[in-house]
Amino acid sequence: MNMLKKITLTITLMVLSGNLLAANDEKQQMNSDKAQIAQVFENYMSKYNHFINKQELKLSPALYSEQVMLISGNGKATSITSEKMNKGVTGFLTQLKAKGVSKVAWETVEVKLLADNIALASNIAVRYLANGEVYDRAGATYFLNKAATGWEISAFALHAPDNAINFSPAI
């Protein structure tokens, strides 16, 4: 009987240890994915600011999936290619520069992993004039998918900055 208790205890401890290791691996993967998604948005802002300063949109690294769903302020959803998306971004940034915007920065970047290969991000961007004054703030919420080449934006909606989603747990 004593031997049976020892075997049972050993098996229980092994199962618990395996579960703890699996949970730790999952947490590490989640942190890695969030860091990779944060890098997507750093690249996003770097491209925007590079265009504002140099009038050239860098195509690498790619930000968008081959097809991107764009939902505008009027609620209309449009599926476009990443190439058309980049052309639209070029036109948009040209207009911002003409209005005196000299820099864009993230105020917040919130990320929620929904599955191993799906994430939701809700961000607020601040657009600055050359004198440092805030021109305006804008909100956007993004769906991202994890492709073979990494995380990419597959859909996004533009909205008021006050409607950005905060994924931080309530205290």
Image (cartoon, grey):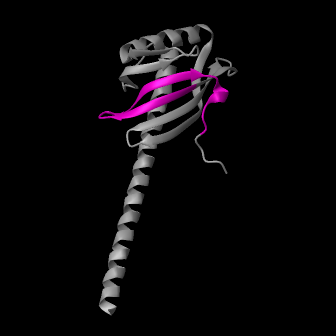
- For residue 115, which quarter of the picture? top left
Residue 25 left/right relative to 96: left
**Can residue 142 be found in the magenta stretch?**
yes
Q: Residue at x 39, y 70 (%)?
A: 16
Residue 105 image position (x, y, % from top left): 58, 27
Q: Is residue 78 above or below residue 112?
A: above
Q: Position of residue 121 (x, y in %)?
A: 51, 34
Residue at screen point 52% across, 14% down? 76
Query: Which residue shows up at 44% across the image and 20% down it?
Result: 69
Residue 86 image position (x, y, % from top left):
42, 15
Q: Residue at x 49, y 35 (%)?
A: 120
Magenta range is 140-166
Q: Is residue 136 left or right of residue 54?
A: right
Total marks placed: 0
Dividing the image into 4 quarters, which one contains the N terminus? Answer: bottom left
> Foreground residue, 97 or 20?
20
In this picture, is 117 found above or below 6? Answer: above
Q: Position of residue 156 (x, y in %)?
A: 49, 24
Magenta-span inclusion, residue 151: yes
